[in-house]
Image (tube, rainbow, N blue to C red):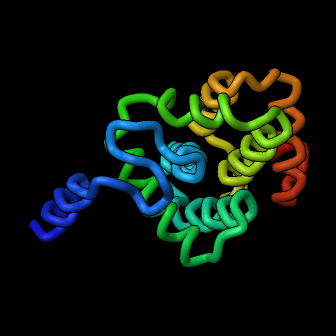
Amino acid sequence: MFKSLMDLFDTLTPDDAFGGSRGGAPSLPLAAAVLLVEVMRADADNAGVERAAVGKALTALFAMSGDEADALTAQAERTARTASDLFAFTSPVDERWDMPAKLRLIELMWGVAYADGTLGDIERHTMLRIADLLHIPQGACYHARIRAKAAAGLGEDS
């Protein structure tokens, strides 16, 4: 019951802490965080390791503290649970970020997917769907995946 009350209060908050507003487009940090969280949610088995990877990605993308990244991750998790599609989050990123910035986000998202040492089918599907919505060429997405896999210390057979 307490959780239900907290969820209700969260929905009544007019503006989020990261610049987005209800009924409007999410802020870029929130949009990017939701996309990272969607990759994490695609693999429920290792949420702890992947949640840490989301926080690390957010600190790399937005030069924020660990506490700020944790707060943004929590907000993104709440937002992702109630989202009906990914377009609301890919659209602001696609419109406002250039290709190198979008590729950096995709590489960090692959890093979240590989944080537990494996890539599941749902994670792969989620990544490819988001990359398509961000208009990332397939070859560039593949190379971002290879870089993230290497950064995770995984070999060719992983």
Which residue: 35% across, 55% down? Answer: 15
Q: Is residue 145 above or below residue 6?
A: above
- Is 18 positioned to the left or the right of 82 in the image? right
Q: Which x, y percent locates residue 106?
A: 74, 41
Residue 43's spot in the image, x, y percent?
Answer: 53, 48
| Residue 23 horizontal/vertical position (percent) | 33, 37
Looking at the image, residue 90 lies above or below residue 110? above
Q: Residue at x 85, y 54 (%)?
A: 154
Taking the view exactly as shown, the residue that stands out farthest to the left is 1
Taking the image as shown, residue 156 lies to the left or right of residue 111, namely right
Q: How many marks?
A: 0
Residue at x-position 39% and y-position 57%: 16
Measured as percent of width and height from the top left, residue 1 is found at: 9, 66
Whether residue 2 is situated above or below residue 108 in the rendered picture: below
Residue in view at x 27 percent, y 58 percent? 13
Nearer to the camera, 27 or 69: 27
- Judging depth in this view, the residue of 139 and 149 nearest the camera is 139
- Residue 43 in sight from this viewpoint: no
Along the line of sight, the residue nearer the viewer: 70 or 121: 70
Work out whether residue 146 can be spotted.
yes
